[in-house]
Image (cartoon, rainbow, N blue to C red):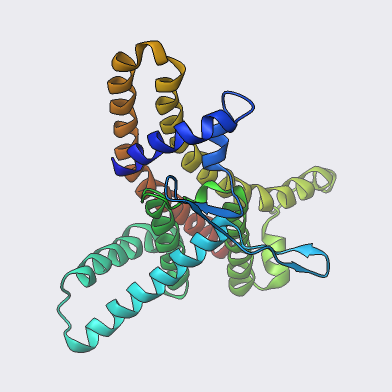
Amino acid sequence: MTNTIQDTVTVADTVHKSEGGSGWILHHVLDSHKIDFTPFGSINLPHLSLFGLDISITKHIFFSWIVALLLIVLLVIVAKSYKKSLIPKGITNLFEIIIIFVRDEIVKPTIGKGYEYFLPFHLTIFFFVLLSNLFGLIPYSTTVTSNIAVTAALAGISFVAIQFAGIRSNGFFGYFKGLIPSGMPALLLIIIIPLEILGLFTKPFALCIRLFANMIAGHVVILSLIGLIFIFKAFVYVVAPVAVGFALFIYLLEILVALIQAYIFTMLTALFIGMAVHQEH
């Protein structure tokens, strides 16, 4: 609710700066070189370049570092708590429930034999995506997974993990040979081989677009609902309660979406790794 109220306040300051009706919406969902704390001001992030290449720290990069650092701190605390007692308490109990869920409901069923080797990777992916999604619901923060560059990087990591898993289990030539169905006529190989190669890249592409689209959609809907207050100024006392009510509903729904998207991203990654490891299936 606080985040919704904050958006309502900042809309009034940004709407007059936009060139079109959607300008202020893009202002809130796109990356930038400053962190906005309207109405308290803003913090400009440093512009950096290396050999003429722009490597500036942007808002989404900054908050992705914050999420990573917070995740490391939390997991260190959880790990140290087991040295004191084998019985989990508080946040340790919460993390244990999530870890067991990822292990027993996602990784083990989809990868099967040898899943233990890939479990740490999937736990890292799940916790990072989940924390990034939830962090965006905090006032004055941002959802880094609503940036397609971030989701593309995560999908790229998953792509490397999928190929590594396939090569590790089947050998370099055995893995790529296994992509082609046995007994395939030679003439069809001209079509099948390019399609199989394309299929290797469509999997991470689907991961990238799915996470990006779902996370940015909720923010756009919330901001659009709040924008109705300023579009229908003459009926503000009628429109405002309805718009804020629906925005609050979508905001609460975003908590569920954050959990679901972390689950889907991890589950699909595990599924693709399982397909690469057990090609005979």
Please tell me whether residue 95 is drawn above or below residue 232 in the rendered image: below
**Where is residue 116 drawn, in percent x and y?**
41, 74
Is residue 56 or residue 151 the one in the foreground? Answer: 56
Q: Residue at x 55, y 49 (%)?
A: 207
Is residue 247 or residue 183 the one in the foreground? Answer: 247
Q: Quadrant of the N terminus?
A: top left
Q: Residue at x 39, y 36 (%)?
A: 9
Query: In the image, is 45 to the left or to the right of 257?
Result: right
Question: Image quarter for residue 221?
Answer: top left
Query: In the image, is 195 to the left or to the right of 52?
Result: left
**Where is residue 214 drawn, in percent x and y?**
48, 40
**Where is residue 130 drawn, in percent x and y?**
39, 56
Is residue 181 among what the camera can see? Answer: no
Is residue 22 or residue 180 the one in the foreground? Answer: 22
How many labels sit on residues? 0
Question: Image quarter for residue 107?
Answer: bottom left
**Where is residue 196 drawn, in percent x and y?**
71, 50
Residue that sits furthest to the top in the current view: 234
Query: In the image, is 44 to the left or to the right of 94?
Result: right
Residue that sits furthest to the front in the current view: 40
Query: In the image, is 14 to the left or to the right of 47?
Result: left
Residue that sits furthest to the bottom in the current view: 83
Is residue 239 among what the camera can see? Answer: yes
Please tell me whether residue 80 is drawn above or below residue 187 in the rendered image: below
Is residue 2 or residue 207 the one in the foreground? Answer: 2
Q: Residue at x 16, y 85 (%)?
A: 85
